[in-house]
Image (cartoon, helix red, strand yellow):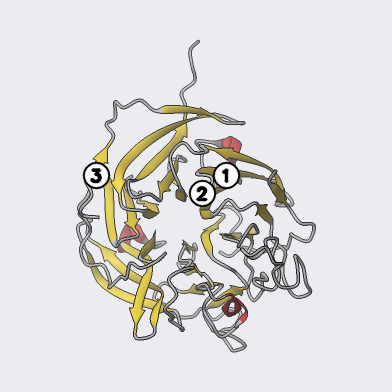
Amino acid sequence: MANNHTPARQHRSMAGIGFSAALSLTLTSGAMAQEIVPTQEVDVAVEVLATGLDHPWGVEPLPDGSLLVTERSGGLRQIRNGKVSDPINGLPDITAAGQGGLLDVAIAADFSTSRTIFLSYTARNESGLGTAIARARLSEDAAALSDVKEIFRMNRFTSVGRHFGSRIAVAQDGSLYFTIGDRGESERAQDMNDHAGAVLRIDAIGAVPADNPFANGGGAAELWSKGHRNPQGLDIDPKTGILYSVEHGARGGDEINRPEPGLNYGWPEISYGRHYSGAEIGQGSAAEGFEQPVHYWDPSIAPGGMAVYRGEMFPEWDGDLLVAALKFQLLVRLDLDDESGEVLSEERLLKGAYGRIRDVRVAPDGSVLLATDEDNGSILRLSRAPVSDD
């Protein structure tokens, strides 16, 4: 049986942080029947918006109702009015290798006027591979990017092809929070001068905000928090400003955290999982100087993206965490206590029905968007099922 825990030392107060060219793409028609899925709180209609995508990694809704979708192999596409675009031109130099490639996409806080987007991706230099962030302007017809500029590149590249992290969350003040995994070299998560194993923060042009915890020394200036293994989910609660992350553990020990400035979340010194060999990790599950997770999973669910639900379509889910899961091909809903933030219960949705779920986003209308990480990947939309007249 899974051991899903909310450790006692989990809560800290926080005062606001501020959908391959070789593949054919198939869109569902508006007349296609939706699958109705019962959940604990409400019946959900699941609609497949697009298929044939090459390992979609990130999906981002745009204000006009269209979607941007990244493909890990290096394609960025738009889904608009029932059509999937050709790959958008003008992307930065991306290396698709191992777990890396074109990863997340996010829009700027002022996108409606600036048309600015941000991309996370794997770059290459003479030392190997690493995570980078670029900003660019999306043309009005969404056919091309212009003014493309790399605004961040991690400070140590290696030949290892895993744990790139790369989820982006844009704050109301325009700053970017984003994740980088330990790059498969766990000790890097405790090196305060290394960008690996961290949540990081920069402003919209790539500069270091003056209130970053290490802006004046003591660690790499872009760091926000350290001690993360491979965080692939990150979101800011639009109501409270609280930043949440979710990361892959080893054998068990996937965890949700509330990253706060300058704090250390323990990897590889503490973990609720074990090494793949079965050996214990570091000092156990707790040690002085390291923060406890909000929630963890053992066995692992292999979490991808995450979203804090704030929307009108599912008021029953208000404030809950939605977590994409690869291993069991499902969407997890965690019910949070409004006052304490404690995880009260967990519900598992869509298990095994649609494939490995890599990303989850809440659309402006309150529907939920999912990306499935498959050779023939899909974009799904979850909406409120109509009430039966029976």
Counting from the top left corner in percent of width and height, residue 313 is at: 50, 36
The crowding category of the residue bearing disc 1, from other C-alpha atoms within 10 Å (few below 14, some 14 to 19, many at least 20), is: many
The residue carrying mark 1 is 332
The residue carrying mark 3 is 25
Residue type at mark 1: give it. Answer: Val
| Quarter that holds the N terminus | top right
The residue carrying mark 2 is 324
Counting from the top left corner in percent of width and height, residue 203 is at: 45, 74
- The relative height of residue 314 versus residue 168 in the rendered view (above or below) is above
Total numbered labels placed on residues in the image:
3
| Sequence-wise first label, 3 or 2 | 3
Please give left or right for residue 55 compared with residue 323 in the image.
left
The crowding category of the residue bearing disc 2, from other C-alpha atoms within 10 Å (few below 14, some 14 to 19, many at least 20), is: many
Furthest-bottom residue in this view: 217
Q: Nearer the viewer, residue 357 or 242?
A: 357
Could you tell me which secondary element the residue under label 3 belongs to?
Answer: loop
Please give left or right for residue 93 compared with residue 369 in the image.
left
The crowding category of the residue bearing disc 3, from other C-alpha atoms within 10 Å (few below 14, some 14 to 19, many at least 20), is: some
Could you tell me which secondary element the residue under label 2 belongs to?
Answer: strand
Q: Nearer the viewer, residue 40 or 367?
A: 40
Residue type at mark 2: give it. Answer: Ala
Counting from the top left corner in percent of width and height, residue 296 is at: 67, 55
Residue type at mark 3: give it. Answer: Leu
* Residue 82 seen by the camera: no
Q: Nearer the viewer, residue 42 or 215?
A: 42
Q: Nearer the viewer, residue 261 or 17?
A: 261
Could you tell me which secondary element the residue under label 1 belongs to?
Answer: strand
Q: Determine the CA span between mark 1 and mark 3.
A: 28 Å
Q: Determine the CA span between mark 1 and mark 2.
A: 6 Å
* Marks 1 & 2, CB-CB < 8 Å contact: yes
Furthest-top residue in this view: 390
- The relative height of residue 10 versus residue 299 in the rendered view (above or below) is below
